[in-house]
Image: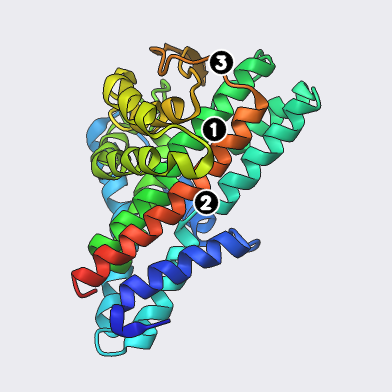
């Protein structure tokens, strides 16, 4: 790996390749360990209070950011060590291969008509209530999750790695994990999780739009439609209740010529979301196409992030 092009740039590419080839570490995954520690701290600090939740989010995020700053400092004059740590951290925080594997498993179950098994499997992709979902709704839920998590689990970590190096990688993944844990609008987390959810929204404002643009640009490489992806993204991206999730979901809907959105249930909370796109409802074959598009977008994001980091001398 040519370190002269930048240790961060080389580390981001190497970490992305490691995730593509090997996926998540099978034991002792640092993100899982962080989640366990954060859950224990939540039990101690929880209160029906935005202020208490903000303190919790700040404390949980400051630890990995501080660790990242320390690692950057001790490797300031050790380029190979900086490269190796950046590659390892990138591998740990990315979730592209895991996302693709889960999408393919869902597609196989739905193609085989194994709806009960698909309902159970959906929890590996998102927190949506699946007990009453039929095959069509399960396909839509999985396709939407593939689109959204292409941004959250691939594009955004690479973006923050390019911008802020190791602290950016670790800090973003910590914040995104907290949002997945306490960011839903359940009675318990409506106030306590508010700060984590809003901070995650801010952290994803730029990456989600970068992800949507890359989706449109890369659509032909995955058999999709670039112009339609761009048009649907610009038209429907703001219709989603999230300021970020709708960006990439709309771009995927346009690229694959399908229709996303509708009624979703999370922890007893029902959301009636606007429709994204103007095609037919997604089928299992479209879920496979979404996985292919996700992979292409991830590769493009890695190249863009590495180029940006190299230009900034990182």
The residue mark sitting in front, 2 or 3, is 3
Q: What is the x, y in percent for residue 55? A: 25, 45
What x and y, as percent, mark residue 20? 56, 60
Callout 2 secondary element: helix
Residue at the outermost left position: 312
Give the quarter of the image for residue 282.
top right
Q: Which mark is residue 312?
A: none
Residue drawn at point x = 52 percent, y = 49 percent: 295
Which residue lies at the image location 29% right of the left edge and 56% below the top edge?
A: 160
Q: Relative to 108, is 15 above or below?
A: below
Residue pointed to by mark 3: 281
Q: Is residue 174 visible?
A: no
Q: Is residue 148 visible?
A: yes
Give the class, few, some or many, for how many residues have Cα within 10 Å of label 3's Cα (few <14, many ≥20): some
Mark-to-mark CA distance, 3 and 1:
19 Å
SS of the residue at dot 3? loop
Dots 3 and 1: beta carbons under 8 Å?
Answer: no
């Amino acid at each position: 790996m040519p370190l002269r092009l930048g240790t961060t740039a080389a580390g981001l590419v190497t970490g992305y390749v490691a995730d593509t080839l090997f996926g998540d570490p099978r034991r002792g995954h640092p993100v899982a360990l962080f989640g366990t520690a954060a859950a224990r701290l939540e039990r101690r600090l929880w209160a029906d209070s935005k202020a208490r939740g903000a303190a919790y989010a700040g404390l949980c995020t400051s630890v990995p950011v501080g660790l990242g700053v320390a690692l950057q400092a001790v490797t300031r004059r050790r380029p190979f060590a900086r490269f190796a740590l950046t590659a390892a951290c990138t591998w740990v925080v990315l979730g592209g291969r895991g996302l693709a594997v889960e999408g393919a498993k869902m597609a196989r179950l739905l193609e085989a008509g194994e709806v009960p098994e698909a309902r159970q499997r959906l929890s590996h992709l998102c927190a949506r209530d699946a007990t009453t979902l039929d095959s069509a709704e399960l396909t839509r839920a999985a396709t939407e999750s593939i689109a959204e998590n292409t941004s959250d689990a691939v594009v955004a970590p690479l973006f923050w790695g390019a911008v802020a190096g190791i602290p950016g990688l670790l800090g973003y993944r910590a914040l995104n994990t907290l949002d997945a844990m306490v960011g839903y609008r359940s009675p318990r987390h409506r106030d306590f999780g508010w700060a984590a959810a809003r901070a995650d929204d801010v952290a994803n404002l730029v990456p989600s739009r970068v992800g949507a643009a890359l989706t449109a640009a890369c659509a032909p490489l995955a058999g999709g439609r670039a112009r339609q992806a761009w048009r649907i993204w610009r038209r429907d991206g703001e219709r989603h209740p999230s300021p970020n999730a709708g960006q990439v979901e709309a771009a995927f809907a346009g690229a694959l010529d399908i229709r996303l959105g509708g009624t979703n249930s999370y922890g007893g909370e029902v959301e009636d979301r606007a429709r994204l796109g103007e095609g037919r409802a997604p089928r299992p074959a479209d879920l496979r196409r979404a996985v292919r598009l996700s992979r292409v977008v991830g590769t493009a994001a890695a190249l863009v992030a590495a180029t940006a980091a190299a230009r900034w001398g990182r």
